[in-house]
Image (cartoon, rainbow, N blue to C red):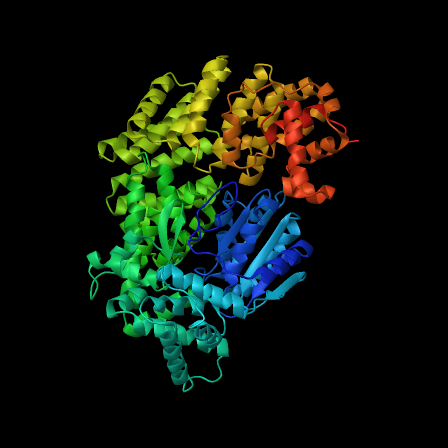
Amino acid sequence: MTNVIPEAGNLPVTFTSFVGRRRETAEIRRLLDTGRLLTLTGAGGAGKTRLALEVAAMSWNAFADGVWLVDLAPVHNPEAVAATAAAALGVPDSGVRPVVEQVAGYLARRQVMLVLDNCEHLIEACADLATALLSAAPGLRILATSRHTLSVTGEHVFSVPPLCPEDAVKLLRDRGTAIQPAFRITDANRHWAARLCADLDRMPLAIELAASRLRVLSMEQVAVRLEDRFALLTGGSRTAPVRHRTLRGVIDWSWDLCTPAERLLWNRLSVFAGGFSLDAAEEVCVGDGIAASEVLDLLDGLVTQSVVLTTESEGLPRYWLLESIRQYGWERLAESGEAESLQLRHRDFFLALAERVDSHWNGADQVGSLSRLRVEHANLLAALDLDADPQGRLALVAALRFHWCKGGFLTEGRRQFDRAFEVAPEPTPARSRALLVAAWLALIQGDMGTAGRWLAEADALGRQLAEPAVNAVVRGLRGLSAYYLGHVDQAIPLYEEAVAALTALGIENEAAYYLLALAIARSRGGHPDAAETCRQVLAAAEVKGERSGRAQMLLRRGVDAWTRGDREEARTLNRAALESVRGFNDYATTALLLELLAWINASAGDHHRAALLLGSAGALWRDAGTGVNAFGPDMAGHHARCEAEVVRALGPARHDKTLAEGSGRDTPARAIAYALETGTQQAPPPPAAMHTLTRRERQVAALVAKGMTNPQIAKELVLSPRTADRHVENILTKLGYNRRLQIATWWAAHEVPTS
């Protein structure tokens, strides 16, 4: 349900206005200023999520590294809470350390607000996560929503009240006008509006559901019919809280007023976790009362009635149900006896999606494919939780290999393979394929022992089941193992055997992966056929529009060009690789490309820019949980020599300051944007330029160099936001710059005094 903006956060796009709650938003922001963990509590339907998202959106400028939503509603396993937070933040998962440690390390140097939404069914896991992250990250604020408190030290609690009478009527008017443009609250119906809102306990969700009836009923009719409905409820449970009974009554009424086909779709949509797309609904929810051609109209009807909500995620239209609505539909679905068959349809849809991505990986839509799988992560995990078909689970976990390895979910992938192998030990083709993918994950994580055991089992299964393709891939992966261990001469013949065998079997896509690996190994090993193999790989990538492998190939060629002294060729290849890897959120490849660009700049005498690039690469390595040394002694040696040269040229103090400045570009998106700058920017003004700045302007420039936003600068120096804005504009004008980054670079280079 999120539209990811990597540099700003991932708050969802909202299509309805936020009404009222001025006192509540002011108080919540005050509490967040004084404490670092605030939990909004209240009954289901009280508006906790919407209030939290509104406060988060209002706070965006105060957090330099963004405001991020972690939706926990679709998460049922407490062990997955930290991984869900990591996925929301885009933390690179190296799979080497526990996920919570990776997230804590990632946030340790960042200024972030984290919204943990729907914590009530995972209280202990959320409490543990909040404690670990807040202990590690001084710049972190957590805003949680839950029906219960987290009960951890330092937690502030805000109980979300019902809307005040005035705001409740405003919400009813707003939603009524959206559904029926001619709708008005007048002197004639104002009494009924107030009465209706009071009967609904002024609960936002209940009011929104009731407002959907104003399309066909008058205000009085809606109020009277709801009163009749609540009268019937008095025969039900008297132990349930009043607001719970009120909400249940409104949802019951909404369900009763739907057509039979709309009810059926509502029930079936509850099988989705974390939202769904139109094509998923049209595939999973059809049959036995719903034709595929009817889904769109039925869905539109449920949207009109506020049962289904709309948003965007990764630029794609998406639908979702509030958790109270989804749980209601799931109860109805379970009563109907359709739950298991719908879960199987759900699993089959996402297995088909994963297999399409897998089979077309070498094409032009790699970034789009990863985005789609990332959006569907909660649904993928739900599909993998299906116990009815262990062989299907093996097939799905293997088909998701690029989601695990390229999408940044190594730890989750390993966990899913362990579960799948445990419940499906039979020697089947699905197990042999899963063993191959699991071994790949283990190799990436550096777990050579486990990878070796899985490859041995896969090799034996391939022979037992007469699957020569399995044995060919085993050879290729053993080549990868040798390469990672630094035995390039052993890797090359294994890659050659894999390519030959897979090509002979007509499995061209799989052969392409090992041809790429062979080209890189031959290039690194100085093989006489290296240039021709690289040319072959790049030609195929150009034809297909493939980008991930192309970036790796260009990187290797760039290193070779730089090593033989062809600086301009190396720069051209590096730039092409950066363009190719853009959008992948690939920390390691981006860091390697920044390393190469730093070496190129240092050898050209631009030591300041080289230091900035090394600082950025260092930040990426830190968050990726690895370093340049992991990529062989030749890369480590180039790095060491470059850094020593930069220190000599700049001096230790200036080197350290510039490195720290560069480390602010700590995501692939930021790093690539900087690296792709043409290098023709204005030279920094000389130190004498400091004398054109006032003392206050020098103080502001120093805070800009620390990465502070204008609102943060205003707070630090006790200025109005408008005054801080004016100071920054004056600095830009006096220095002849047009970007804040240029101020920071100049200040760091010249160690400008602030007094």
View extreme (front): residue: 187
In which image quadrant can residue 580 be found?
Answer: top left
Instruction: State the image coordinates of residue 308 (x, y, percent, origin top left).
Output: 36, 61
**Image point (80%, 31%), residue name:** 755
Horizontal placement of 496 versus 53: left or right? left
Q: Is residue 321 visible?
A: no
- Residue 600 in the image: x percent, y percent? 54, 18
Residue 437 at what x, y percent from top left?
37, 44
Indicate whether 360 appears above or below 170. above
Place of residue 598 in the rendered image (x, y in percent of width and height, measured from the top left): 56, 23
Which is more toward the observer, 490 or 536?
536
Q: What is the number of callouts on the image?
A: 0
Q: Nearer the viewer, residue 71 or 486?
A: 71
Q: Could you say which is closer to the camera, residue 526 or residue 318?
A: 318
Q: Is residue 561 left or right of residue 507?
A: right
> Seen from this angle, which residue lies furthest bottom?
235
* Viewer-closest of 399 and 196: 196
Left or right, residue 719 beside residue 319: right
Return the residue found at the far top: 565
Q: Residue furthest right?
A: 755
Q: Is residue 229 above or below residue 323?
A: below
Q: With respect to residue 209, does 740 lie above or below? A: above
Residue 630 appears in the figure: yes
